[in-house]
C-alpha cells in the first residue's frame, strides 16, 4: 500500500462523503495510486448519522475504506493517531473532511517524496471554493512572530507583509497563486496546516505522530517543529491544488480558543520557562486589544465576549 488517507469526521456527513468521492475520482486512473491507496475515516462520535452514511457508501466502492467509530470526540490529533494504527501505507495524508481533491494533486505530492529524502512534510496549495488562493502556515512560534500577530501589525497594509507572523499573515502573504505559477519544486516554509498534510510513515515512526495533549489547533505547528528539529524540510507543493471549505469542519470560536491554548502549550514544550511566561503576556495583550477593537472600532458583541473568555482562561 502506497498511500493511507486519514480523515477525521465530526458531524460533517455530506462534506466527508464529498471529500472521499473526490479522492476516488481523481485517483481512479492514476498509474501510481490506482489500487494503491486506502481511506481511513475516524469518526469523533458524530450525531448526524455520518457513520451510517459511510457504511452505506462503503458498499458501493472498491477503494478500501476503513471506518473507525469513537465513543467520544477525541479531538483532531488523537483521532488521526488512531487512524495511523490502522494504516498500511508508505505515506500518510491527514486530510480534512471539508476538502475537495483536484487534478493529480495526490499523485504529484507522493512523487515529490521519491526525489527528496530530506522532505519530511508536504502540503498542497489550498484554494477557496471560488479557486482563489487560501493562505496557510506561517512562521514558527517565536516571541517576535507572536507579538506581530497578536498586535495585528502583520495585518497592516503595505508594511504588514514585512513582519514575521505565527499565522498566515505577515511575510506569509508574499506567497500567492501568481508566485506559485512559476514554481516547480516544493517551497520550503516553517509550518503547513493540517488541512492536507502528507508525511512518510517512516518519519512518523521516527519523530512521533500528533501530540495527543493538543485537542485541536496547533498540533500541525508542533508536528512541523519536530520534523524540522530532526532536519527534515516542510514545504508547499505548487503542483498540487486542493479546495478547502474554510471553517466547515470546525467553528471559528473553537479555532480562536484553540489557537491561544495551542500557543501556550507549544511554548511550554519547546521554549524556555521565561519565553513561555512572556508569550502568555503577549497573548493577554492580544486578547485585550481585540476586546477593545470589537467594543469600539468594529463592534461585535459575540467576538468581544469570546476574547473576554479567552483572557480569563490565560490569566
Image: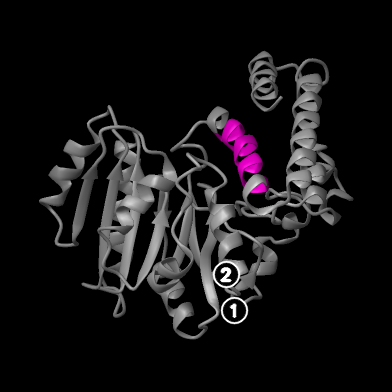
Query: What percent of the width, then of the height, locates residue 46?
Result: 29, 32
Compared across the picture, whether 126 is left or right of 54 comes to right
Q: Are marks 1 and 2 in contact (CB under 8 Å)?
A: yes
User: Which color mode does the image show?
Assistant: one colour
Give the mark nearer the N terminus: 1 vs 2: 1
Residue extending farthest bottom: 115
Q: Which residue is mark 2?
A: 238
Q: Which residues are magenta?
A: 255-267
Quick check: is 257 in the magenta stretch?
yes
- Which residue is at the front of the view, 161 or 219? 219
Q: Quadrant of residue 139?
A: bottom right
What residue appears at the point 74 percent right and 27 percent down from the top-left corner? 287
Residue 105 shows in this picture: no
Q: Judge from the rendering whether residue 161 lies leftward or rightward of residue 176; answer left or right.
A: right
Does residue 7 sit above or below 257 in this rendering? below
- From the image, tell me which residue sits under label 1: 185
Amino acid at each position: 500500500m502506497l498511500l493511507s488517507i486519514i480523515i477525521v469526521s465530526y458531524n460533517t456527513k455530506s462534506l466527508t462523503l464529498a471529500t472521499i468521492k473526490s479522492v476516488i475520482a481523481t485517483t481512479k486512473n492514476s498509474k501510481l495510486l490506482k489500487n494503491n491507496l486506502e481511506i481511513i475515516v475516524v469518526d469523533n462520535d458524530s450525531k448526524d448519522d455520518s457513520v451510517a452514511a459511510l457504511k452505506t457508501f462503503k458498499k458501493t466502492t472498491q477503494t478500501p475504506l476503513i471506518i473507525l467509530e469513537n465513543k467520544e470526540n477525541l479531538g483532531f490529533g488523537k483521532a488521526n493517531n488512531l487512524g495511523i494504527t490502522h494504516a498500511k501505507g508508505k505515506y500518510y495524508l491527514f486530510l480534512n473532511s471539508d476538502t475537495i481533491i483536484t487534478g493529480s494533486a495526490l499523485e504529484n505530492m507522493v512523487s515529490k517524496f521519491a526525489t527528496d529524502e530530506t522532505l519530511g512534510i508536504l502540503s498542497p496549495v489550498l484554494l477557496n471554493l471560488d479557486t482563489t488562493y487560501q493562505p496557510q502556515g506561517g512562521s514558527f512560534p517565536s516571541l517576535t512572530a507572536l507579538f506581530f500577530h497578536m498586535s495585528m501589525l502583520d495585518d497592516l497594509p503595505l508594511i504588514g507583509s514585512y513582519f514575521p507572523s505565527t499565522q498566515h499573515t505577515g511575510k506569509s502573504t508574499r506567497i500567492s497563486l501568481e508566485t506559485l505559477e512559476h514554481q516547480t519544486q516544493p517551497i520550503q516554509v516553517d509550518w503547513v496546516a493540517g488541512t492536507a498534510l502528507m508525511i512518510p510513515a517512516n518519519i512518523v515512526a521516527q519523530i512521533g505522530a500528533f501530540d495527543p495533549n493538543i485537542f485541536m489547533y496547533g498540533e500541525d505547528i508542533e508536528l512541523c517543529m519536530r520534523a524540522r528539529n530532526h532536519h527534515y524540510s516542510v514545504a508547499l507543493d505548487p503542483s498540487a491544488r486542493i479546495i478547502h471549505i474554510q471553517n466547515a469542519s470546525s467553528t471559528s470560536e473553537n479555532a480562536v480558543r484553540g489557537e491561544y491554548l495551542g500557543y501556550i502549550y507549544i511554548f511550554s514544550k519547546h521554549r524556555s520557562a521565561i519565553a513561555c511566561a512572556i508569550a502568555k503576556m503577549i497573548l493577554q495583550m492580544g486578547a485585550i486589544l481585540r476586546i477593545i477593537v470589537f467594543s469600539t472600532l468594529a463592534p461585535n458583541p459575540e467576538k468581544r465576549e469570546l476574547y473576554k473568555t479567552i483572557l480569563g482562561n490565560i490569566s
